[in-house]
């Protein structure tokens, strides 16, 4: 299988393909960390591409020559679920890698693009709300666990997550 992919900035035209990637990734990869009762309602919300992220200019996709997406993720100044902005703080958003494409550096490459763009935009610290199963990935990339938390996706849907942070200038 050819493992070459290109990273590019996502556009609103990617909504369907990003949704398909999220549907392929999240149910399989999150099953090890969450029970069905917590995961099922969360997946209904989490597997939909966010139009605001797709149009942000700070959301990226990893695309094969065939046009299939094997990874996605980005960052914003706005805290997830709010419009609040804290100067110097950026937020990692909606990362996923297709389960058949994990451990090939795709997530790391997308995060590197996020780092570069966030630094250029004046971000000094990145924060993420990691799913329980993704904590190890973010820790390997220098994020530090702050605390476990309940992340409200949409009332009454809540998913256990881990708040993590990384200073962009400690590297």
Image (tube, grey):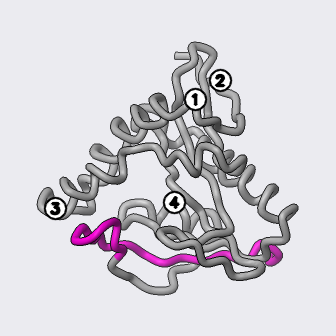
Provide residue 70's location: percent of width, then percent of height: 52, 32
Sequence-first tag of 2 and 1: 2
Secondary structure of the residue carrying tag 4 is: helix
Identify the residue at image location x=32%, y=53%: 45
- Cα gap from disc 2 to disc 1, whole angstroms: 22 Å
- Cα gap from disc 2 to disc 4, whole angstroms: 21 Å
Q: Which residue is mark 1?
A: 13
- Cα gap from disc 4 to disc 3, whole angstroms: 20 Å
Identify the residue at image location x=16%, y=61%: 35
- In which quadrant will I find the C terminus? bottom right
Q: Quadrant of residue 139?
A: bottom right
Labels 3 & 1 near each other (Cβ < 8 A): no
Left or right, 15 with reference to 4: left
Q: Which mark is residue 35?
A: 3
Q: Nearer the viewer, mark 2 or mark 3?
A: 3
Provide residue 102's location: percent of width, then percent of height: 48, 40
Residues drawn in magenta: 151-171
Q: Nearer the viewer, mark 4 or mark 3?
A: 3
């Amino acid at each position: 299988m050819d493992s070459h992919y290109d990273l590019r900035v996502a556009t609103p035209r990617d909504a369907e393909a990003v949704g398909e990637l999220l549907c392929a990734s999240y149910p399989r990869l999150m099953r090890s960390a969450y029970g069905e009762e917590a995961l099922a309602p969360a997946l209904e919300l989490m597997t939909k591409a966010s139009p605001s992220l797709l149009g942000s200019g700070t959301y990226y996709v990893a695309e094969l020559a065939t046009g299939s997406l094997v990874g996605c993720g980005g960052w914003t100044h706005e805290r997830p679920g709010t419009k609040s902005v804290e100067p110097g703080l950026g937020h990692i958003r909606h990362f996923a890698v297709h389960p058949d494409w994990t451990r090939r550096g795709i997530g790391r490459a997308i995060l590197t693009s996020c780092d570069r763009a966030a630094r250029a935009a004046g971000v000094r610290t990145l924060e993420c709300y990691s799913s329980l199963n993704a904590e190890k990935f973010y820790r390997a990339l220098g994020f530090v666990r702050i605390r476990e938390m309940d992340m409200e996706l949409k009332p009454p849907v809540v998913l256990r997550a881990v708040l993590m942070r990384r200073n962009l200038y400690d590297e």
